[in-house]
Amino acid sequence: MKRLPYNSPVTVLALETSCDETAVAILRGNDSRYELLVYAPRLLDSAASAAKIAPSEIDVFAATSGPGLASSLMIGASIAKGLAIGLGKPYLAVNHLEGHLLSPFFDIEKGGGNDIKPHLSLIVSGGHTMLVLVRGLANYQFIGRTVDDAAGEAFDKVAKMLGLGYPGGPQIEKHARGGDPKRFDLPRSMLGSENFSFSGLKTAVRYLPKVAERRLTQTPCNLDEEMLSDVCASFQQAIIDVLVAKTLAAAQKHGVDLVTVSGGVSCNQELRRQLREACSRKGIEFKSSEPWLCTDNAAMIAFAALLRSQAGFQSQLTREIDPNLALV
Ligand code: KG4
Ligand code: ZN
């Protein structure tokens, strides 16, 4: 494996197409500084021209190789491989979950992301809810995952039940503000386990009196604003309680002094606040991704590719996409 000296900057073009959008980012960095030349959703051409960078200046072409939708993953990987072949540069397949997991270390101002300290990572997105023990870059141990719905999926499904739009997380967070999180006694499932389950919580919301009535009569949302606020606040708090309790228990069990959170659900301000407070009570450092890096984006894939390429990783051009790609 060829290691690049840490101080030589590497320029990465990365595509993220795990779901139904195509996003491109170009990132240049070494161990002390990053320059996000462009973070352009959708267009490859505009990425290169906005970055004022010639294709020949790109050192590595990266793409998400899974998990995600096969047809979408195929597009990003094919483009990155085609560019790598055409320009005679390496190709790097990146696991979407590793993109989320590393994103709390992506600090454009301070740099220093090469130092992935041992920590416990909570990944909470629309497709995944996972606890991972990180010993360093590419050195991951699986701790727990959801046995049914992902946290974000629960937010989306409950929002739909309440007649709120998609994605549900931001809608529920908005309506939860000012609501009473104790008004409805909703279940906190599987607290004794390192795995998660959110489908019982979703069902419990479905059978709350006014919510059930709305479903049975097929009428539009007839909850008054106070009731809606209280349902949202109670539901959000049930999810947060479970995420905080399990993350803290795992952090203590595995003796880590740093906890990170990433993925779309980590945009949630209340989750970030309560996790930060719980960590600080136990003397554990806490890091979250910047809000723009929480939901799916290509910059996190470029960042993961940059760290991996500096550590000497490269992928075979024959490497296939894998819709069920595991992190560990
Ligand atoms: O990471 P992401 O963009 O896509 C996946 O990899 O799945 O996560 C999307 C999920 C959606 O389920 C969305 O409802 C949730 O993240 N989400 C939130 C918030 N913003 C987005 N959940 C709770 N609170 C938020 N503010
Ligand atoms: Zn994601």
Image (spheres, grey):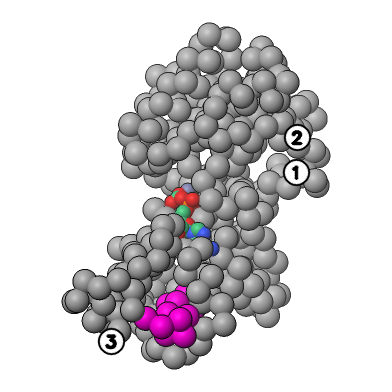
Q: Looking at the image, do the residues carrying marks 1 and 2 touch, with CB atoms under 8 Å apart?
A: yes
Q: Is residue 17 visible?
A: yes
CA gap, disc 1 to disc 2? 7 Å
Q: Is residue 39 above or below residue 77?
A: below
Per the image, label 3 sits on a secondary structure element best described as helix
Per the image, label 2 sits on a secondary structure element best described as strand
Label 3 sits on residue: 209
Label 1 sits on residue: 108
Q: Is residue 142 above or below residue 316?
A: below
Q: Nearer the viewer, mark 1 or mark 3?
A: 3
* Amino acid type indicated by mark 1: Ile
Give the image quarter of residue 219: bottom left
Q: Which residues are magenta?
A: 223-238
In the rendered image, residue 308, in percent from the top left (x then y), is placed at 60, 34
Q: Is residue 265 above or below residue 224?
A: above
* Amino acid type indicated by mark 3: Pro
Q: Is residue 78 found left or right of 259 in the rendered image? A: left
Q: Is residue 133 above or below residue 304?
A: below
In the rendered image, residue 271, in percent from the top left (x then y), is placed at 56, 70
Q: Main secondary structure of the magenta part?
A: helix
Label 2 sits on residue: 35
Instruction: Determine the residue positioned at 53% across, 70% down.
Output: 174
In the rendered image, residue 99, in percent from the top left (x then y), is placed at 55, 43
